[in-house]
Image (spheres, rainbow, N blue to C red):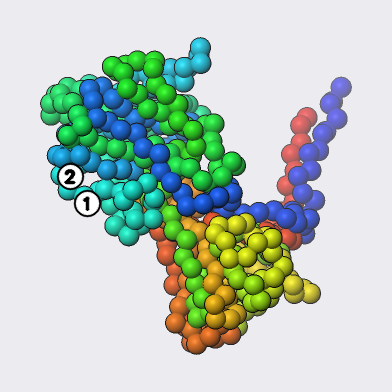
Amino acid sequence: MKKPAILILLCSSASMFCADATGLRIGAPLPTGQTGAIVANVCTIDAANKACAWIFQAQAAATVTTLLFHYGTRGGTPVQHRISIQGVNAGSGIGMPNGTVAAAAAFTPPADTSWDMTGTALAGCVTSNNCMQAASIANDGAGASISSLTLTRGTYYAIVIETCPNATAPCTASVSADATNKSTFVSSVTNIGTFGRTAVPYALTNAAALPSTTWTKVTDTPIFGYRSASTTYGTPLLGNTSTVINVNAEIGVSFNIPATWWSSYKVLGIRFIGQTPAVNSSVKISLYNGNGAAAPIQTLTWDSDIIRVNATALESFTLYFSDTTLQTLNAGTTYRIGISPQGAGTAIAMATLDLLAAGDRAAFPGGTNFAYTTRTGCSGACDAQTAVTFTDTTTSRPLLELILDDITAPINTATTSASVH
């Protein structure tokens, strides 16, 4: 007897595609729970066999060519180091590097401050742009020349930094650091907020002879990264800043949702991290089609007295547009949302995550489709002017997310079904 057909209906028509996706959020590079200036936790290599490591699960079957690390500070003339990809020992509560090197590169930090971070705050790294370094894979664990390593999606790996253990390429000798030629590396950062702490991936430090099982797991958000020829993975944070603006400036996000994601959508509101303004003032949230050379297509004027606390640093804002009818936006088109103080002395700020290269935005949700955008030098509130246009900073992602409504299917999406006989 023929089995009855079972129809699995995913979407009966394009008009029904996520039409009631009210409140869907997109665009925040990390969970928006920052509680203060992001501060670095460092791993120090200042004695024989000390090491730093990061454990992660491969997101894709990426062919890795480059490993990223965030340098901290140096002492004297640093020695040569090796950075490698290793396997992970699992079971019995270990979850640590297994000491088997699959790919490696060598680097020697400079005997000056050109890589150094200032204190424990990451903002100085944004100015110098040298704290985050990229090392190209050059050899495997046996010294044979390779330029890449293909990961297996879902498999756990470790990135390990240590002083060169021997003269096997890419290292040229066996060396050991001490207090006079030490280096520190940013293992993780604090103040992303409770939702920013991660159980996987995570960072570790080791002060024992390698290989060992005496690694110490580090709390908070790990800072590491790796690249293929086309994509960056991990949390390769160079630094973060919080830019304060007044009445003659506007800050926000530039975004272009690919047409392959959906056809059209609406923006209901935004959520962002920033400094709160003073009392007795107002701030306008504006949605622009393009670079600000035309008037906003959607706005909200927010009274700064309607807030939990005024004139304090880094609070979370959730604000909704007040237009009776929300504008329908087209996927594949660039839009911007700007935040502009409406009076002198209002002063508001937005926090950003800053990166070594524009392509490193791909490591965060939303990828290179989002960028930090600003305009300055306006004669009064920027939202009322079209002479000054926005400039995008493609190496920064603002801690801002869009709150969406009424998403429609991609163009030419037909009714999708599957049947089993």
For the residue carrying disc 2, how many other residues have a C-alpha within 10 Å: few (<14), some (14-19), or many (20+)?
some
Residue 176 in the image, given as x and y percentages of width and height: 18, 26
Residue 370 in the image, given as x and y percentages of width and height: 51, 60
Looking at the image, which residue is at 44% across and 68% down? 392
- From the viewer's perspective, is 267 left or right of 63? right
Looking at the image, which residue is at 32% across and 60% down? 127
Residue 190 in the image, given as x and y percentages of width and height: 48, 42
- From the viewer's perspective, is 376 left or right of 108? right
Amino acid type, callout 2: Pro
Callout 1: helix, strand or loop? loop
Find residue 293 and name its label.
none
Residue 333 in the image, given as x and y percentages of width and height: 56, 68
Task: Find disc 1 in the rendering and name its residue.
Answer: 114
The quarter of the image holding the N terminus is top right
- Marks 1 and 2 in Cβ contact (< 8 Å): yes
Amino acid type, callout 1: Ser
Q: Quadrant of residue 44?
A: top left
What whole-number distance in Å separates the C-alpha atoms at marks 1 and 2?
7 Å
Task: Find disc 2 in the rendering and name its residue.
Answer: 110
Between 403 and 16, which is closer to the camera in this rendering? Answer: 403
The quarter of the image holding the C terminus is top right
